[in-house]
Image: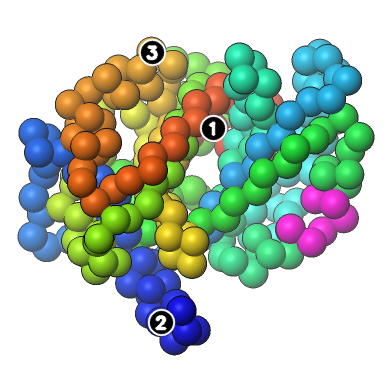
């Protein structure tokens, strides 16, 4: 795949990323104007080695101040996440652009995190953010964030990845324009916002969803809308990951709120 083709794919994706389809719940929109965005999402997962949950929680308290607004250039917010059942922890970071994300990825702070002897099996993925995320309250920095944990603040994160099969980037983009209305504020119970994401070079797309609680995320995954997404013949190799949100995320502007 040559560089010119990759660049064309990036442009198409950034203008309008498609995500999902549901035969029953599909919303047609013939004139969507989505702003271009350079925003990036970084997802990080790791496991613990010879470290208790209490010690890990203390580590979070010790380092969260590094992620306060204004401390890291271009960082819009970081959500501290964890799945106790699977023993997986990490973060969802939102950056203004790829340059800021790249700078963080080579910073002393990041290198110190990955070098910690009790944090192991790191997995890091970066994605562009589609402009249509503005319609689903998915643009970090433009949505309300909580100053304290409440019933209208996010407590659960769902991260979805999939690949395309016999579907062009352009057709995928049109699919996104067709269905984004399903994720507008108030359309999915308990959904605070959804960020449409994708990495065209790797051919991976998806979304980061924030829910008010785990029960609402369960409800969505049992809905006809989600079942229609999974059943789409051109969206394949789905991967879903569920995480709770650590309250310290408030300090890092990482808790969206209604």
What is the distance, in whole Å, between disc 2 and disc 1 at their CAs?
A: 37 Å
Q: Position of residue 132 (x, y in %)?
A: 30, 56
Q: Considering depth in this image, is 162 or 65 the residue closer to the camera? A: 162
| Disc on the earlier residue, 2 or 3 | 2
Task: Nearest to the eye among marks 2 and 1: give it.
Answer: 2
Identity of the residue drawn at 57% across and 55% down: 126
Identity of the residue drawn at 67% across and 29% down: 89
Q: Position of residue 164 (x, y in %)?
A: 32, 55
Magenta part of the protein: which range? 105-111
> Does 5 appear in magenta?
no
Q: Which residue is mark 3?
A: 215
> Is the Cβ of the residue at disc 2 closer than 8 Å to that at disc 3?
no
What is the distance, in whole Å, between disc 1 and disc 3 at their CAs?
A: 18 Å
Secondary structure beneath label 2: helix
Identity of the residue drawn at 25% across and 45% down: 20
For residue 148, side relative to residue 174 (left or right):
right
Question: What number is the disc on residue 255?
Answer: 1
Is the residue marked by circle 1 packed among few (<14), some (14-19), or many (20+) residues within 10 Å? many
Secondary structure beneath label 1: loop
Is the residue marked by circle 2 packed among few (<14), some (14-19), or many (20+) residues within 10 Å? few
Question: What number is the disc on residue 5?
Answer: 2
Identity of the residue drawn at 62% across and 29% down: 81
Q: Main secondary structure of the magenta part?
A: helix
């Amino acid at each position: 795949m040559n560089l010119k083709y990759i660049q064309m794919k990036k442009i198409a994706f950034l203008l309008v990323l498609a995500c999902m389809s549901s035969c029953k719940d599909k919303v047609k929109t013939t004139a969507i104007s989505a702003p271009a965005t350079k925003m990036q999402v970084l997802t990080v997962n790791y496991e613990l080695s010879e470290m208790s949950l209490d010690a890990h929680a203390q580590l979070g308290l010790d380092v969260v101040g590094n992620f306060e607004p204004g401390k890291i250039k271009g960082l819009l917010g970081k959500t501290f996440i964890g799945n106790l059942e699977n023993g997986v922890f990490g973060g969802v970071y939102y950056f203004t652009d790829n340059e800021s994300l790249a700078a963080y990825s080579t910073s002393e702070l990041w290198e110190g995190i990955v070098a910690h002897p009790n944090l192991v099996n790191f997995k890091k993925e970066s994605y562009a953010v589609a402009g249509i995320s503005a319609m689903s309250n998915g643009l970090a920095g433009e949505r309300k964030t909580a100053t304290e944990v409440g019933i209208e603040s996010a407590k659960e994160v769902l991260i979805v990845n999939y690949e395309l099969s016999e579907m062009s980037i352009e057709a995928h983009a049109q699919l996104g324009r067709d269905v984004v209305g399903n994720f507008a504020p108030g359309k999915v119970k308990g959904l605070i916002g959804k960020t449409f994401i994708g990495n065209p070079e790797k051919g991976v797309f998806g979304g980061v969803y924030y829910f008010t609680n785990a029960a609402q995320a369960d409800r969505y995954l049992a809905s006809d809308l989600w079942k229609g997404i999974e059943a789409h013949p051109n969206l394949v190799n789905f991967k879903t990951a569920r995480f709770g949100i650590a309250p310290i995320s408030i300090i890092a502007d990482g808790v969206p709120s209604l």
